[in-house]
Amino acid sequence: MKYLDEYRDPELARLLLAELRRVTTRPWTLMEVCGGQTNTIVRQGIDELLPGGIRMIHGPGCPVCVTPLEVLDRAMAIAQTPGTILTSFGDMLRVPGSRTDLLALRARGADVRIVYSPMDAVTLARDNPDRQVVFLAVGFETTAPANAMAVLHAATLGLTNFSVLVSHVLVPPAMTAVLRAPGCQVQGFLAAGHVCAVMGWTEYEPMAAEFRVPIVVTGFEPLDLLEGILMAVRQLEQGRHEVENQYARAVRRDGNTAARAAIRRVFRVTDRTWRGIGAIPDSGLALTDEFAAFDARRRFDVGRLVVREHPDCVAGDILTGAKTPLDCAAYGTACTPRTPLGAPMVSAEGTCAAYHNAGRRREDRHASR
C-alpha cells in the first residue's frame, strides 16, 4: 500500500505526542466512532501513550456488533427455508444469535455462503433462477452505496429471486444519542473517515454547534489518529467546537455525491434498534417503496421471533463506552474469539476482539485507565 509507512513513522508519532503534552492543560475525554480506529488505537497502544488526563472512549463503531439480534435470528430462519441461499460477509457468520450462528447452520446443511461483494449475491441469483438468494446487508453508510447498486442491478436484470435483509445503521444519530445519554462524559469526537468519504461532514456541523463539542474527521493509521486527537484537544483547549477534517486525502465536505444519490434512491431513513443499545430514532435505512419487492422481510414469513441475549455479555455497556472489555467478567475466559458470547468479540472491528488480539488481559486493567 502506497504511503503506508509514512503514516506509521515513529519519529512523527513522537513529535505529535510531544505536541499533545505541550498543549494539554487539563483532562479531556474523547470518543472514536469507528471500529477500525479502535483497532488501531488498541493494537498500537495509542491510548496508553497519550498524556495523562486524555482518555479515549471506544464508541459504537462496529456495524457487525450493533446489528440487532432480531436481524440475526431472522437471517438464520431465512437460511433454513428450503430453496434459499443466504449470503453475507464472512464476519457475520460467527456473530451469535439467540441460540446459534450462521456458521453452525452451514455446518448442519443450510446453504450459507460468504461473498466479497453484494454483486456476488446478484450473480448467484442470476445463475440460480430456481433458488431464492438473500443478501444480509449490514453496515454504516460506508457499505450502503454498494448495497444500493446491487438492488439497482438486480432490478435492471429483472430478477425476482434476489432480496436483501437490510440492517444499515447511521452514525450521526448514534453520536447524538451518546451526547444526550445521562452521565455522558464525551467532550469531543473522532468521526469515521470512511463514513465521511461517502457522506461528507455537513451532518456533523449542527451537532457540533448544539452540543458544543469538537468533531474531527479522522483516518485510520496511527499518525491519522494522533493528529486527530491533537486537533480535537486544541479545539477543547481553545474553547472551540467545530468540525475539522484531518483525513483531507480522502474526504471532502460534501462526500461522494454519486454514492449519496444511489443511497437516496434505494433507501429511506427509518428508526433502528442497535444491539446492546436500543432503539435510536432515524438511525437506520430501509428500502423505499420503489424497491420493496427486494425486501427479504416481506418475502419471507418466518413468524414471530423471540430474541435472547446471553446474560453474561455486557456488549451494550462496551458499545456505548460505559465499560471496557476489562470490566467484563466473561472477557478472556468464557468469552474468547473461539467462543464468543457477543458480537464485539467476533468482528475484527469489535472492541473486545481488539483488546484480546492486542494481548490485553483483565489483570492489566490499570493499562486502560
Image (spheres, rainbow, N blue to C red):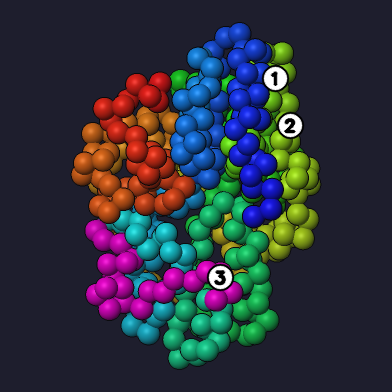
Decide if residue 111 is in sight here.
yes
Q: Is residue 220 above or below residue 117?
A: above
SS for callout 2 = strand
Q: Is residue 51 magenta?
A: no
Residue behind mark 2: 244
Amino acid at dot 1: Gln
Q: Earlier in the sequence, mark 1 or mark 3?
A: 3
Task: Give the percent coordinates (x, y) of residue 314.
Answer: 31, 37
Amino acid at dot 2: Glu
Q: Nearer the viewer, residue 250 or 63?
A: 250
- Under tag 1, what secondary structure? helix
Which SS class for mark 3?
Answer: helix
The answer to whether mark 2 and mark 1 are in CB contact below 8 A is yes
Question: Residue at 41% of width from left, 60% of height from top?
Answer: 92
Whether residue 190 appears in this view of the structure is: no
Say which residue label 3 marks.
118
Q: Position of residue 50 (x, y in %)?
A: 53, 22
Q: Position of residue 38 (x, y in %)?
A: 50, 39
